[in-house]
């Protein structure tokens, strides 16, 4: 009884810290292109990256870290220790953002995400009064947001500036279109304020673009975050046990496998026609809805995974005209959030055409690849289950690694289980996805550790994907701007397979495949090294991470 | 094939004549071509004394300006010399392995028993002579083995070879004596009796001296790493191999889980009778051959024929080597040429319950693509006809096993129509899993992290349906042959690497027949060297040139 009380007291302290931290994080976390870290913000929130605010946040972070360090969970059960480490990782991620990648000081594109990214209104209509007001507020905040980089960008990187300049090309035309298309959706009060807010935002962004253009010659051409920092991120934030050289070896081997397997599929399907592109939007939406239902049935029939009946649909919608000019701002989906579990997850599509970008084209040929990765049983299902977690730490913590690993793992799981056996050529799509993800590892790691410059990374992509050099340069710059992000699929898929293999070995004949995801999906926000510690009880990865973290710079972990 | 240096070819011919066949890994040991009783200590001394002269002649050549083909040949010959060096500096079987002499005696007899019956008088003489060599071979064991360096674990391997040996020899005599001319049977019986006595005596000697054997069976970490690099041209470090092995192991476990779950409603595969299995096997040959042809996956040369099964019997220790110590047959007819014949036992024999045999009986394709078409048999018939004299003779486990293993997953993913239905996929993934498990097994066995007994259990614990007979036979082989166990999956990954790079070089346009024909055209040589010739990538090669010789190691 005494022990239980003691544990509860500690857990309570940790919960208090978590509650305060997540409230704070909702104010402080930067907007990003990735769909996984999207979080619910308080009403009236707008980004604030003024130097004074950043300094305040630094002090607040230090206070959180001090509180966290003062909590002793060494005698607690493993789940509590896992929660403790989750908070350590979450705190360290803030430091990674502020002090290591320091996008607010190095990356001009960062401010494009904080501005244009906020206009990227993903949840489908309606825009009620509050939401309408929020849109206008965000537009109104843009001039002050893009004033900040003039003070903050003291180590600007030229390659990232060029990306930002590219993103801001035609900004007037784009935002004007957004405002025109959005106005009828908004409340009348918001709609009245919209033109002025939009115009001021456009002017501010055009000025920012011009300012960047003028300063290009003085900017740093080095992009790498550095080997030590990269290892530090993997050990302290992502909680990944693998060393960069191991990641490279794995990436190469998986790339070779994916290229080989894709080639097998093509040979198997030699002479067969390509998968047709769906003829109309209506036909696509109908097919996607049918396929989503079929995927659920397949999971049940093959006894692979349980989808609780309360989980809402994952469906496609035609991208609304107000989103179209902003699609470069991120993944065009809305996977809902902790307070919106009663809503469907949505992925926006474009009108069918042979000229569609890569992922959209794959959806127009066969929506199931993206249904599986992004929807059911991938991101949407996992995130919905995690957002329903009774433990608020695990509900709010996010880590792209485990999310993307689950999304990537289920692709091969479903392929192996036979979902893509028909129609012919559907399997090629999955192996093609696999190939592209595997080759990102080489680019991400080498760009981050400084073994590749952006042109070298572009050469690799151009040769290996293959793709044209201009696109390859842009891709390489994107990878360099977000070290550690492009490899999440590959790293974590490996960790999931390892977890599955060890759980199976430990459980023996009692192991049931369908029961495995019940834990992994629900805890899908939790890094897999910690899941491994908690579920089959193996702390080898945690020990590796601790050794690596202890050897790396300024670790707040213990 | 014309080489830049005729001296390289001359040197290869002379070195290969010099190299004693007695010390090569057990599966490769030839059939005692000399048919005399070797003086092992003298052979060892001669090998050690002679080798440096050949190495010096090789070192005097400067291959760096030669064409890539010739540089590869230089490295191959260097590897063969290094292998001999390894035999006598590291393995030292004549000094450290008590089982060695028992194997030399027994394998020499088993080799003479192969072929058709009835035996001619000349062959009967050879069989009797092989039995008669037993005593003189075994007598050298106690004289040549150094107890302080000999391994008790390997001593126990010898004891297993020699368990109930008189009864086994007597039972064997009943089987093959009827095929020996009547005029020879008396001499044969006497020779068997004398051989049995010698084997029993040697067994007693091992038992008596087991406690005094203080050596280790494994080669050690440094020697293992050196061997991987200099003899097998493995481009990856040991930690990279372990990482690779673990990644693949986990993938295959996932596949097994999913296949089993998916096939939950399918009828379990039933075990066929031996006669039915022989027919399944023939069907598998036909289907595989025409599937390969129909898909235009590889050229089928005229010198590759049918591989087929014939009814045989079981009598240890006269059968095949390794895990088939009792499998033999007495066929009155020679197999047609070209072809490959394998003897099999009746369905009620205990051997049918062992790991490989059980699975192969459930569906022959589980091993057919590996051991027959287009695996070992097919590959061996092609590569031994390589026009380059160095390559026609060179043997490399990384290529041989990598090639055979590569096809297993190729068939799975290329949609091979499994005759016995989808449950065969579960079995094939099980075989794939085993090869991945062998990577840590190989490393741990070679560096001594696992004892031989632990290694036997390691495989049983990690591979469903693995059992002691097979696991033990494999461990007894692998402990004296670093890299062999790992070479399956590592060789496969290297072939996938070459394939992927060729696909990129070809802008994602693949001609499968050309790729597979090209792979075999380089001979049975390490895949890293194939990669250099085939893709032009030399990034892995520098470390092979730079790796030091064993003689320069501390």
Image (cartoon, coloured by chain):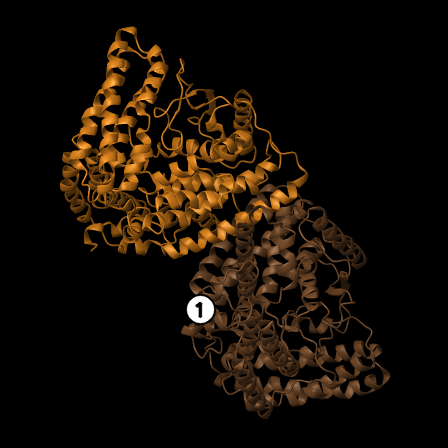
The residue pinned by badge 1 equals A452
- Asked whether B40 or B499 is in front, the reply is B40
- Percent position of residue A425, x then y: 65, 47
Considering every residue shown, the one lying at the far right of the view is: A188
Q: Which of A405 and A359 is in front in this view?
A: A405
User: Image point 35% across, 31% down: which residue?
Assistant: B385
Of residue A105 and residue B169, the one placed in the foreground of this image is: B169
Q: Position of residue B453 (x, y in %)?
A: 37, 43
Residue A466 visible: no
Chain under callout 1: A
Residue at 44% across, 29% down: B301
Q: Which of B319 and A379 is in front in this view?
A: B319
Left or right: where A129 falls relative to A19: right
- Colour displayed for chain B in the image of the structure: orange
Q: Which part of the image, by quadrant, shows the N terminus of chain A? A: bottom right
What colour do you see for chain A? brown
């Amino acid at each position: 009884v005494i022990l239980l009380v003691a544990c509860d007291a500690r857990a309570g302290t940790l919960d208090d810290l978590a509650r305060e931290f997540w409230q704070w994080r909702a104010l402080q976390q930067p907007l990003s292109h990735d769909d996984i870290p999207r979080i619910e913000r308080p009403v009236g929130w707008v980004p604030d990256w003024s130097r004074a605010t950043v300094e305040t946040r630094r002090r607040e972070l230090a206070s959180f870290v001090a509180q966290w360090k003062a909590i002793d969970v060494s005698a607690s059960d493993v789940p509590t220790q896992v929660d403790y480490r989750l908070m350590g990782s979450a705190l360290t991620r803030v430091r990674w953002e502020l002090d290591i990648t320091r996008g607010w000081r190095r990356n001009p594109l960062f401010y494009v995400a904080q501005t244009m990214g906020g206009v990227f209104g993903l949840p489908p209509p309606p825009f009620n009064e509050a939401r309408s007001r929020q849109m206008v507020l965000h537009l109104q905040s843009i001039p002050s947001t893009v004033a900040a980089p003039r003070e903050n960008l003291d180590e600007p990187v030229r390659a990232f500036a060029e990306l930002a300049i590219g993103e801001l090309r035609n900004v007037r035309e784009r935002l004007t279109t957004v405002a025109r298309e959005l106005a009828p959706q908004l409340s009348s009060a918001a709609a009245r304020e919209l033109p002025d807010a939009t115009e001021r935002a456009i002017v501010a962004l055009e000025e920012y673009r011009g300012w960047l253009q003028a300063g290009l010659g003085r900017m740093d051409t080095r992009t790498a975050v550095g080997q030590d920092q990269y290892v530090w991120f993997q050990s302290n934030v992502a909680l990944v046990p693998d060393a960069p050289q191991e990641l490279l070896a794995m990436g190469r081997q998986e790339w070779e496998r994916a290229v080989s397997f894709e080639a097998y599929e093509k040979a198997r399907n030699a002479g067969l026609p390509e998968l047709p592109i769906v003829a109309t939007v209506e036909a696509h939406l109908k097919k996607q809805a049918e396929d989503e239902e079929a995927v659920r049935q397949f999971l049940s029939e093959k006894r692979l995974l349980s989808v609780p009946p309360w989980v809402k649909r994952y469906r496609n919608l035609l991208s609304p005209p107000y989103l179209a000019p902003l699609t470069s701002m991120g993944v065009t989906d809305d996977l809902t959030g902790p307070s919106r579990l009663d809503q469907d997850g949505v992925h926006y599509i474009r009108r069918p055409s042979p000229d569609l970008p890569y992922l959209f084209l794959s959806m127009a040929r066969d929506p199931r690849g993206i249904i599986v990765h992004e929807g059911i049983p991938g991101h949407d299902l996992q995130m919905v289950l995690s957002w329903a977690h009774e433990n608020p730490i695990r509900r709010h913590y996010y880590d792209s690694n485990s999310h993307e690993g689950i999304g990537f793992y289920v692709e091969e799981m479903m392929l192996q289980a036979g979902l893509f056996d028909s129609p012919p050529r559907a399997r090629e799509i999955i192996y093609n996805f696999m190939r592209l993800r595997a080759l990102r590892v080489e680019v991400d790691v080498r760009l981050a550790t400084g073994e590749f410059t952006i042109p070298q990374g572009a050469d690799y992509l151009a040769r290996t994907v293959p793709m044209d050099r201009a696109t390859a340069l842009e891709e390489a710059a994107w990878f360099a701007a977000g070290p550690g992000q492009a490899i999440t699929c590959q790293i974590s898929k490996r960790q999931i397979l390892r977890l599955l293999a060890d759980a199976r070995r430990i459980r023996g004949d009692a192991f049931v495949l369908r029961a495995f995801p019940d834990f992994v999906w629900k805890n899908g926000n939790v890094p897999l090294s910690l899941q491994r510690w908690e579920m089959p009880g193996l702390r080898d990865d945690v020990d590796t991470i601790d050794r690596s973290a202890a050897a790396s710079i300024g670790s707040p972990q213990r | 094939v014309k080489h830049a240096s005729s001296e390289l070819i001359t040197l290869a011919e002379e070195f290969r004549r010099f190299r004693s066949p007695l010390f090569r890994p057990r599966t490769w040991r030839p059939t005692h071509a000399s048919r005399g009783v070797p003086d092992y200590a003298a052979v060892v001394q001669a090998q050690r004394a002679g080798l440096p002269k050949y190495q010096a002649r090789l070192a005097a050549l400067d291959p760096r300006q030669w064409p890539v083909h010739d540089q590869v040949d230089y490295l191959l010959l260097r590897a063969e010399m290094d292998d001999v060096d390894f035999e006598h500096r590291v393995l030292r079987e004549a000094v450290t392995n008590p089982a060695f002499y028992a194997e030399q005696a027994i394998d020499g007899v088993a080799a003479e028993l192969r072929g058709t019956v009835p035996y001619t008088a000349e062959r009967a003489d050879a069989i009797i002579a092989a039995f008669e060599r037993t005593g003189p071979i075994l007598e050298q064991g106690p004289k040549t083995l150094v107890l302080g360096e000999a391994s008790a674990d390997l001593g126990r391997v010898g004891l297993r070879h020699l368990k109930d040996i008189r009864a086994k020899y007597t039972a064997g005599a009943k089987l093959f004596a009827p095929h020996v001319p009547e005029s020879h049977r008396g001499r044969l019986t006497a020779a068997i009796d004398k051989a049995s006595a010698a084997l029993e005596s040697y067994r007693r000697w091992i038992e008596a001296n087991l406690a005094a054997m203080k050596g280790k069976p494994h080669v050690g970490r440094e020697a293992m790493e050196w061997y991987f690099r200099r003899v097998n041209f493995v481009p990856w470090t040991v930690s990279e191999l372990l990482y690779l092995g673990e990644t693949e192991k986990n993938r295959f476990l996932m596949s097994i889980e999913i296949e089993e779950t998916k096939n939950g409603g399918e009828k379990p595969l039933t075990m066929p009778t031996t006669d039915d299995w022989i027919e399944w096997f023939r069907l598998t040959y036909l289907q595989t051959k025409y599937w390969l042809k129909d898909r235009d996956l590889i050229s089928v040369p005229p010198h590759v024929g049918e591989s087929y099964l014939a009814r045989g019997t079981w009598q240890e220790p006269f059968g095949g080597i390794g895990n088939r110590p009792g499998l033999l047959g007495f066929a009155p007819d020679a197999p047609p040429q070209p072809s490959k014949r394998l003897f099999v036992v009746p369905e009620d024999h205990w051997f049918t319950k062992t790991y490989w045999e059980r699975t192969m009986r459930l569906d022959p394709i589980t091993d057919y693509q590996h051991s027959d078409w287009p695996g070992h048999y097919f590959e061996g018939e092609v590569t031994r006809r390589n026009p380059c004299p160095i390559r026609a003779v060179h043997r490399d486990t990384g290529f041989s096993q990598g090639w055979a293993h590569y096809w297993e997953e190729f068939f799975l993913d290329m949609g091979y129509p499994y005759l016995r239905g989808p449950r065969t996929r579960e079995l094939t993934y099980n075989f794939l899993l085993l090869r991945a498990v062998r990577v840590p097994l190989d490393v741990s066995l070679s560096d001594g992290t696992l004892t031989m007994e632990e290694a036997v259990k390691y495989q049983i614990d990690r591979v469903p349906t693995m059992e002691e007979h097979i696991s033990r036979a494999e461990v007894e082989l692998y402990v004296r042959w670093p890299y062999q166990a790992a070479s399956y999956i590592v060789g496969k990954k290297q072939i996938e690497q070459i394939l992927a790079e060729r696909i990129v070089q070809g802008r994602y346009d693949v001609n499968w027949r050309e790729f597979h024909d090209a792979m075999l055209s380089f001979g049975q040589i390490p895949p890293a060297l194939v990669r250099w010739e085939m893709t032009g990538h030399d990034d892995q090669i520098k470390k092979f040139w730079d790796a030091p010789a064993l003689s320069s190691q501390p």
